[in-house]
Image (cartoon, rainbow, N blue to C red):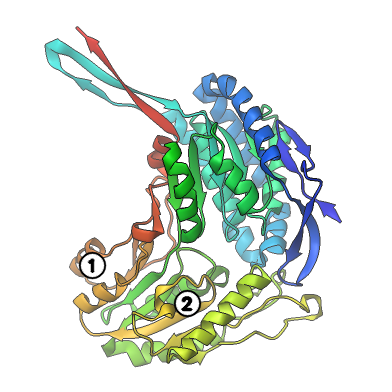
Amino acid sequence: MYKILNYIDGELREPETGGWIDNYEPATGKVYSLIPDSDERDVAHAVAAARRAFPQWSTRSVAGRSDFMIRIADRIRERHEELAQAESTDNGKPLSLARKVDIPRGAANFRYFGQAVTQFHSETYDMGTNGFNYTLRRPIGVAGCISPWNLPLYLFTWKIAPALAAGNTVVAKPSEITPMTAHLLSEICIEVGLPPGVLNIVHGYGAKTGAAIVAHPDVPAISFTGGTTTGKAISAVAAPMFKKLSLELGGKNPNLVFEDCEYESALATSVRSSFANQGQICLCGSRIYVQRGIYERFVADFIQRVEALKIGDPQEADTDLGAIVSQDHYKKNLAYIQLAREEGGEILCGGKAAPVPNERCTGGWFLEPTVIAGLDIGCRTNQEEIFGPVVTIQPFSTEEEAIALANGTSYGLAATVHTRRLKRAHRVAAELEAGIVWINSWLVRDLRTPFGGVKASGVGREGGTEALHFFTEAKNVFIQL
């Protein structure tokens, strides 16, 4: 059985506990590798290594740090197919999606921040004859980065890259459900000669390994992406220790389709935004609101498109939906579908386990894409994050009603608006309680823009200058003339 290893102080190491966690392939339901069951001792070793490496890494020239970032990006690109295969196997997502989105974005994160840090500037304020102020931005120290299972390499590198580029050293924990590409990133760091201790990757359970990173007194900054409940627990520990926090949490994103939309584009985009990566993207539109004038037509066409999606072996080129990431998450999705029935929802399509696509996938966790109608905004199905191929659909009459429905949950991560009217697009976007609004599109990302949510969807922003600001501390200096 293949053993994934921790990456600490430039070396691949077994866990101090000597214990291992089974790593399952979602498409088959079988264990295919083992993960370190690390604890606070492994985290302590990693933090100590990061602290030793910090003085030299933080004072290395910007060009020197940038060079390592670009080398890592190049090596990810060179190992693209191996990484894509690993991501698909580990996560259950279609191989085509991993090839097109996950791995290229992992390389892009390192390349972008490797270049962005060379353009990172600070402010100067002229006070005339009195003097002037200028701002220094200095790395914080050891950054703790904890990432989720849905976009493993994509989101892991999204945190690590700006932290390293800004001059911090890092102790990172990938999800124990999808650890393989993080392990391969360890190999890449060794291959490019990244100095020992600059990046440390510790595998294990969140309640044990992740909690030890959050609580460690020598880790002054925590960047976390994951569930809102876990985010609350992290805040409860980190806030009294006065750590910097960036929390990208859950979502229950609305998708507003107005009568004046570009119909075919809105329909195709809605199918994609509902079920990409089996609906396991925090930005998926899980609540669809359609204006009454086109509601019946849209629902009929939407169901037809959804039923045509192919649920299949993630390794097959024409698979649209692969396997749910874990057995527990598969059961959670089925439980929410049953809850929707109990709340009076009508299952328009899906609603049950999908047939096993082939003999290899016997035992895998496959679920039909599910569309539910007839539920009001206050029910649990419309209020709680399901994070799977399950969406609700509902009509609305006026712009004001659409905005009220969209804002009617505790979440505020993203929203999508389909309309041809420019004034309406601006007006609705301004009123939506969300950190990101897409007009007539979905999941169009520019790494320069701020990323994050409001309300229960998070604290702080990632991306571009926002990320480099988070991973540095500002110091004002005044010069008397």
Element assignment for label 1: helix
Specify which label sits upstream in the sequence, 1 or 2.
2
Which quadrant does the N terminus fall into?
Answer: bottom right
Looking at the rendering, which quadrant does residue 24 occupy? bottom right
From this viewpoint, which residue is outermost toward the right? 1
Return the residue nearer the eye: 310 or 52.
52
Towards the viewer: 281 or 174: 174
Q: Nearer the viewer, mark 1 or mark 2?
A: 1
Q: Secondary structure at mark 2?
A: helix
Where is 256 relative to 224, above or below?
below
In the displayed orientation, state which residue is furthest to the left.
129
Task: Name the residue tied to disc 2.
Answer: 271
Q: Amino acid at mark 2?
A: Val
Q: Residues within 10 Å of mark 1 (few under 14, many from 20)?
A: some
Residue 468 image position (x, y, % from top left): 43, 36
Residue drawn where x is 68% and y is 57% of the image:
84
Figure check: 98 above or below 267: above
Mark on residue 135?
A: none
Please indicate whether residue 212 sits to the left or right of residue 456 in the image: right
Amino acid carrying mark 1 in the image: Val
* Residue 48 shows up from this direction: yes
Which of the numbered marks, if any, corresponds to residue 428? 1
**Residue 398, how many percent across, how many down?**
20, 81
Residue 347, percent across and down? 49, 91
Residue 31: x percent and y percent? 80, 64
- In front of the other: 81 or 246: 246
Real-space CA distance between mark 1 and mark 2, rounded to the nearest whole angstrom: 22 Å
- Residue at 21 percent across and 76 percent down: it is 399
Task: Place residue 380 in its image quadrant.
Answer: bottom left
Quadrant where the C terminus is found in the figure? top left
Q: Is residue 3 above or below residue 271?
A: above
